[in-house]
Image (tube, rainbow, N blue to C red):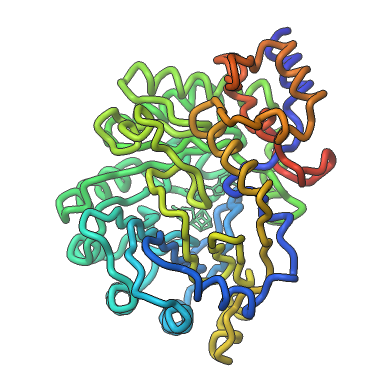
Amino acid sequence: MTHPDLIAKYGGPVPRYTSYPTAPHFHGGIGPRTVRDWLQASRGEASVYIHMAYCKQLCLYCGCNMKVTNNLNVVSSYVEVLMAEMRMVAEPLPERLEVSTLHLGGGTPSYCPVSDLEQLIAVMRDIFMVRYGAEVSMEIDPRQLAEGMPEALGQLGFNRASLGIQDTNPEVQKAIKRVQPQEMNRRAVRLLRDAGVRNINVDLLYGLPLQTPETIRRTIDDVLELKPDRIALFGYAHVPWMKKHQVVLENYGMLPCAAQRMVMFDTAAEALKQAGYLAVGLDHFCLPSDPMGQALQQDGLHRNFMGYTTDAAPLMLGFGASAISQYRDGYAQNVSSPTEYMALVKNHELPVVRGIRMTGQDHARRAVIEQLLCSQKATAPDLTDLLVDSVRLKDLIGDGLVKWQGESLYVTEKGRPFVRVVASCFDAYVQPEGRYSKAI
Ligand SMILES: C[S@@+](CC[C@H](N)C(=O)[O-])C[C@H]1O[C@@H](n2cnc3c(N)ncnc32)[C@H](O)[C@@H]1O
Ligand code: SF4
């Protein structure tokens, strides 16, 4: 079967599996009372995610949960509420948890005034014990990197920064309303590294309007000049039914189709491999010296709401609007709207509005799906019992995308782009007509 045939057969909508069960299956039956019980049973190590909900401008492709504001007082009030939420979450905890990973995402955390950020980190360090050597990272929009921010990040212990670059072609940048000259990227990387934030990640997108394999190739050359430690090469998720502003991107004619997207991904992946980067999971690349490269070689790679991670902490606490927490017994998500989030916390209520309690089978299936997404193989004594869609798996095997070897299931090199489809064979919740983004 040729690539276009495979795309036609398997390229339909499928979850991204940053959790299992995935977020569309969370429901309103999980609220503050359940979460208080889950917190009371939480001990040991945790990773912490803080969602900074605001940006200065809207990028037309954006699929993140964010609001635009030009008023920094709004951002400062939000940070006040984040600190209040942290104190509220700390109350039921039986002990001071040890933090192995701290990540500030968004929205645009680098848009936050330095003084607010300093207070936030101080409160977080007061409540939790940040482990020596923990990964402390922040998503940075190079267009919103105020003077003094790189130095403040270095002093606050940040050791990794993820820069949103997306594409360096000026025409593509105009189309997506994100004009960001390469000199701005160079400056951000230089200032951050000089300030001690040594590890640099870069986010790129393929599948945007006006992109071609040639423009992608040039973007990769620009990015290689920055010598990032990790690169995330995300397929643009076009979900205009959820993010209305994305519709504008359809004015540039047809968005790249699945076959074109695949050529773009392959072009970028090949260039990155030639430059010495290792391919990690679905869409990441890293230098062999990066902890992710080492984790890859030692089966230590994991996947959670932050995407691929080296962090193995089974407990993840998410703070801020829309943030998701992962407990031993299930997931809980905060209300998405920053306004509603702030109102609930100010009213001394945990802002949790949905989630899901996990069954024993959910735990077993999550382990299989995580193995597939991280290492393109799954091993479990009861693998066939966990299978939900054996017909589809048989098809995938027949088309040479997966194969059994003893008790293990392997995704072949040809099957690698379709690993989410393989994972969906073990998903007891997936709906064939569900509104997920496309597999390719
Ligand atoms: C919260 S944003 C990054 C931080 C910062 N706001 C910025 O844009 O530089 C995280 C990343 O999500 C990715 N992203 C945003 N919208 C997306 C979409 N519709 N499909 C796929 N990835 C998307 C982008 O690569 C972006 O850098
Ligand atoms: S991509 Fe980043 S900067 Fe752009 S709107 Fe989304 S979160 Fe904000």
**Residue at screen point 63% across, 72% down:** 335
Q: Position of residue 83 (x, y in %)?
A: 41, 81
Q: Judge whether 183 appears above or below 125 on screen.
A: above
Q: Looking at the picture, how far across and down is residue 80, in whole percent?
A: 42, 84
Residue 316: x and y in percent read 47, 60
Of 400 and 36, which appears nearest the observer? 36
Closer to the camera, 81 or 108? 81
Check the image and report above or below for 387 versus 126: above
Residue drawn at the location 57% of the way across and 41% of the way down: 367
Q: Quadrant of the N terminus?
A: top right
Quadrant, the C terminus: top right
Residue 354 position by quadrant: bottom right
Q: Is residue 78 visible?
A: no
User: On the rendered structure, is 180 left or right of 154?
Assistant: right
Q: Position of residue 247 (x, y in %)?
A: 72, 49
Vertical order, 218 against 310 (above or below): above
